[in-house]
Structure formats: structure tokens, C-alpha cells
Amino acid sequence: MWTLFLSLILIFSFVLQPGLTCAQTYSDLWGKNGDSWTPYSRLPDFSYAGYAQGERPIPKVQQVTNIKLFGAVGDGETDDSKAFLKALSTVKRGAIYIPPGRYKITRIIEVNRSNVVLRGAGPSKTILYFPLPLNKIEPDWGTTTSGKRTSEYSWSGGFVWFNGWIEQKKLARVIDESSRGSRVLKVSSTKRLKTGQWIQISLKDDRKKSLFNHLYSDDPGNTDAIKPASHKIRLVCRITSIMQDGIVLDRPLRCDVKLEWKPRIRSFKPSVSECGIENLCFEFPKRKYDGHFSELGFNAIAFDHVYNCWARNIKIVNADSGIFAKGRFCTVQGVTFELQGAETTKNNLFGHHGIFLQGDDNLFTAFNFKTRFIHDISVSRCSGNVISNGKGVDLCFDHHKRAPFANLFTNIDIGKGSRMWRSGGGANLGRHCGAHETFWNIRAERSQNYPGSFYGPDSMNLIAVKTDSSSEKALDKMWFEDISPDGIQPQSLHEAQLSKRLSTFPQHNMPFVCEGHPLQ
């Protein structure tokens, strides 16, 4: 008996050790190693998000010059704008090093060519200081959807602005319908297509708004402010093989392809790729924040129509908005948002958007919000983005209407948990959240409930969200899987899907050339 008692003590002491668990918990939508998942399931494949689709790390680009060789002083008093502009107009490719110092900048620093990197000595050592807002430097007034006058920089633009364009020539028509999850498209001709080629599959809505409705699983809410035949989406992918009358894609379709949406295969030729900014701090003046739509453009970074770019190891202090990301396959990694001496609103808010994702297949990861914006993490008119491995004091996942669908929020500590579902967007632009939006392993101090029907359709997926509610699992209706965030495996759905894809399809892990632009 004594021996049995000691054995039981040893067993229980092992089970109760911190960090040890006696069992793992798996989602019915994924299983242990993805064994319960198929591309046609209600759970999308998020593994293609971020730089190089996650198939290789962000490169350490060779340093080719020093900003001080172009006249920068870095004393916090001298205007160093001309030195930055001269460096960017001179350097054809490589990293421009910005040594420790405080660099005053009063101009927009635009990066409009590929293979250029701005690199500091670290966020505590290299500080870019912007005393004036964008709207004072280059005025750009506009109005909100309700008619209020405000600066366009309230929702766009940045002082470091990666700015490009995408050439989109028509290569072929899609001649047969295909379902979400499929990798095969029948096309009118394969003469202008080849294996390894990057393409865009473009869809344009009809006058019945049937595409827009489809992106909400035919439950879009009020869409009176959406103009008929106005919504467009594009899926960027690679051709893995050519058939007699069609092509095979490297990834599953994110939505159905129907002929009434005039599906086309177009070229994908980005003018700007392989650019980055890293290891520095953006600092804006200490001031009082006057609230929503008062912002004049103390914004840090913007990615517009660029591809395979990045921002990493960045601190952003006292910003109106931190980052606007309209690129594709870009990674924003290791960003900290802070306030220093600035005055918040009565609700303890400062600034408009922390990050606003309006491009597809981007990765925002390893972030830390030490302050609260009106909209901390925003998505709108986008899909395939992954927000992962981050934390904040009281985060909100702002779904800004206009059909953000099939984006993933995973392995995130939202802090206090008082406003997880708080979202904005104009009136009558559809529900906040679109189809197959997925929330996986969301931790909080407070329990969270499934959002109301105003938020999004039943095709949303909620798995391992901090809650006191019971599971409701119906494959054709609501999916709310009550699993402890501490016990869910995998902790990051994105990392598990990426690992599975790269082990299953090693042939995809190879360099491809995008119409003359090397992708590595």
C-alpha cells in the first residue's frame, strides 16, 4: 500500500509540473498534424503568408554604404532629409546603414526601386524623428464616408513609403468554373503560360454583387453603399504544371471561381520587391491626441503595391498610425508600439490604426502593443493575411468591412480583453468580417463570447479563444470550439500549416523568377 501511495504521489507531481501536460488537445478542423484537414474544409490554408511565402527567411542584405557619407548628422537638430533622399537616389541595391543617432526628417522618404534596405543599429540607438505631420509636408485633404473633412493620411501613407506598381497584362481567360480549395483551372489558351510562372487570377463582381456576397458566404448584411460591379479580388500564385487545357496552381483557391465574375489569368510583374527597413525607431512629437479622424499623418511605414518586402525590429513611438500594408507577401516582424509623454483621449486611446492590412498574404508577427489605438490591428478588402505570435495591453481585431475574408489571427495574447471585437468601417459596407476568418489560440484576462450576427457570417472559425461558453460545432453553420488556449496544439496554426506544406510539397521550396525579378 505504501509503495502504491508513493507511486501516486510521483505521478501527480509529474503531471502538475509547470510546462508539462498529460494530454494535448486538437481541433476537429485540423487534428494532430493536419490529418483532419483538406483544402476544401472551412479552414483555409494560411501557409503562404509573408516574405517568400515562408519558404526562406528574410535575407541579411549586404551593407553598401553609410548614411553619414551623404551628409547626415544625426544630432536631432540638423534636418537630415536631403541626406536620406540623396542616398536613395544614388544606391542601386544593398543596405544603407544608419549609425546610432537621432535623425530629424521633414520629407517623405520614398523607396521606389527593388533591392534597397534601410538598416539602423537597433531601435534604442538609431532614431528617426519626424517633427511635422505628412499633411503639412504634402497636404492631402479628404472626407470620411459620412462627409467629415479630414486628412487622407488618417488611413494611408507613411514617412518611409515603399511605393510600387504591378503590371497586369491579360494572359488567358478561365473557361470553366472551379470550387474553393481546388488547384486546377481550365483556360482558353496556355501559349503565354509556363511552369514556375507567377500569375494573378482576377475576379470582378457583377451587378448583382454576387462575388461580394460570396465572400460573406451569402450573408453580407447591408451592402447599399457598395456599388454594383465594383468589387475585385486577385489571387497571386505560381503555376506548378501545364495541362492540355488548363493549369495546376501551387495553392488552393481561396474562393469559388465563377464565369459571371469574368475570371482572367493576368501577369504579375511587381516594380518593387526585396526591400526592407530594420533595426530602428520611429519617433513622433509628444502631443495631445484629439480623437478619431483628427490625424494629420504622423505615420511610420507604408507598403503600397510592393512584393516580398519587410519591416523588422522596429519601435514606433507616438504615431497617428503605425503601418499601412497594401503589399503582397510582405512580413512585418518584431514591432513595438509605445507612447512617451503623449496625452491620450478620455478612453485612454492614442492614434488611429496600429497596423492596417489591405493587401493579401502578408504576415504580421512577434508584435507588442504597449498602447491602445482606436483600431489596433485592422483588415479590410484583403485575404490570406496572418497575424500571429503577438501581444497587447487590450487589443482589438478591427474588421473594417468591405469583405476581409480568410485571414488568420493565431497565438495572440490580447491582454485585458475588453474590446476584442471592436471594429469600424462606414455604414452599409457589408458586415465587419467575411467568410472563413479564423481566430485560433486567443488568450485574454477576460472571457470572450462569439460575436453577434452583426459581425460576420457563421462561416467564421473560432478555436481555442478564452471563453466560458460551450462549443457549438456545425460544419455548415457556426464553429466555436471551446478548447483551452493553453492546451491547444498547435499553438500557431500558421506555423503548423507552413511546416506541413513544406514537408509535403518540397518541390515548391525553390527559387522562381517573376518576369525578370529574382525572388531571392
Image (tube, rainbow, N blue to C red):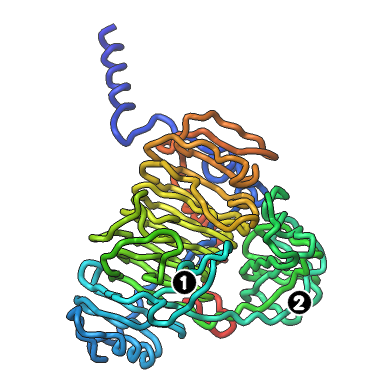
* Res. 151 mark: 1
Q: Amino acid at mark 1?
A: Ser
- Total number of numbered discs in the rendering: 2
Secondary structure under tag 2 reads strand
Residue at 30% x, 85% y: name it.
Answer: 81
Is residue 500 something one can see in this rendering?
A: no
Whole-percent x, y for residue 504 in the image: 56, 56
Gap between marks 2 and 1 measured at Cα:
41 Å
Q: Amino acid at mark 2?
A: Ala
Residue at 75% x, 64% y: name it.
Answer: 228
In-image side of 235 versus 303 (left or right)? right
Whole-percent x, y for residue 407 in the image: 55, 55
Nearer the observer, 198 or 503: 198
Earlier in the chain: of badge 2 and badge 1, it is 1
Whole-percent x, y for residue 451 in the image: 55, 40
Nearer the observer, 74 or 1: 74
Image quarter (top left, top right, bottom left or bottom right) of the N terminus: top left
* Res. 172 mark: 2
In-image side of 394 versus 423 (left or right)? left
In-image side of 390 versus 256 (left or right)? left
Residue at 29% x, 69% y: name it.
Answer: 284
Whole-percent x, y for residue 189 in the image: 79, 77
Q: In the current view of this chain or complex, which residue is farthest to the left?
A: 75
Contact between marks 2 and 1 (CB within 8 A): the answer is no
In the image, residue 3 sits, relative to residue 300, either above or below, namely: above
Is residue 89 something one can see in this rendering?
A: yes
